[in-house]
Amino acid sequence: MAVFSKILTMLRGDVRDIGQSIVDNNATTIYGQEIVEAKAHVATAKQDLTMVMAKEIQATREIERVGKDLQRYEALAMEALQKDQPALAEEVAAKVADLELALAEQVGARDQFANHIVRLKDMIRSAEATLREHERELAMARTTESVYRATATISQSMGTSGSKLMSAKESLERIKQRHQDTADRMQAAGQLADEFGTQALERKLAAAGIGDTGSRKAQVMARLQQRLLAVQAIGLDKTPPG
């Protein structure tokens, strides 16, 4: 029996440890949910506050109404006394007494509502300020956790041979080397074309005035000179004698 009790105690301890571990691993999520629920309570409190404020408005309006009735019946009681109607004046006085009692009750209720409103507004302001502070703390906690996760990932990657970061760096270096090799080959091919290619030879011949390019230039120049001489000769023939 003692062994069974110890086993139950161990199981309770394991359940407590597991529960604590779950809470610790999800502390930020739980914290965020608690803030959400607290904001919902504040929203409900604001709704309740509007109801109390509405009651205060109603009480104020009732005070105004009862006050007007009180003034009216007091005036009527005075008029009854002036007209020597004591019985009627006494009856009106009883009405005035009832109205005074109702007025006092409404004033008391309005004052209570006003006190509740002041207290509730203070509580809501304090709660909202606390919520804003908790929201800032939650944002900081989430940011810190993100930084920790990123740091852990980078540390794990850097600490492992053949890690993703090292592999990516090696791939980048290979790409750069391949591009450099291609550029070097293109530069070398251009140099060979300049030194040994047919185009290089043609450029050299043209520069020396040798070959087809030089002959065509000479033929064009000769043709143009002959045309110029012919034009000049025709002009001399048409000149009138002096």
Image: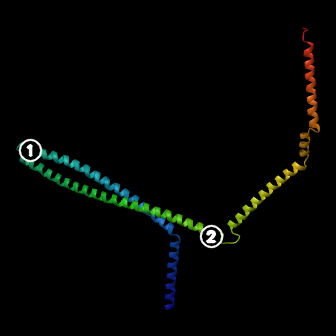
Residue at the disc numbered 2: 155
Classed neighbour count for the residue bearing mark 2: other residues with Cα under 10 Å, few (<14), some (14–19), many (≥20): few
| Image: 195 above or below 169 | above
Residue 86 place in picture, x, y as percent: 6, 47
Mark 1 is on which residue type? Answer: Ala
Which of 144/12 is in front?
A: 144
Query: Relative to 141, is 104 on the left or the right?
Result: left
Query: Relative to 2, is 167 on the left or the right?
Result: right
Using the image, tell me which numbered label, if any, was put on residue 80: 1
Give the CA distance from mark 2 to mark 1. Answer: 99 Å
Q: Place residue 47 in its image quadrant.
A: bottom left
Residue at 75% across, 59% down: 176
Q: Are marks 2 and 1 in contact (CB under 8 Å)?
A: no
Quarter holding the C terminus is: top right
Q: Place residue 119 in its image quadrant.
A: bottom left
Residue 174 place in picture, x, y as percent: 76, 62
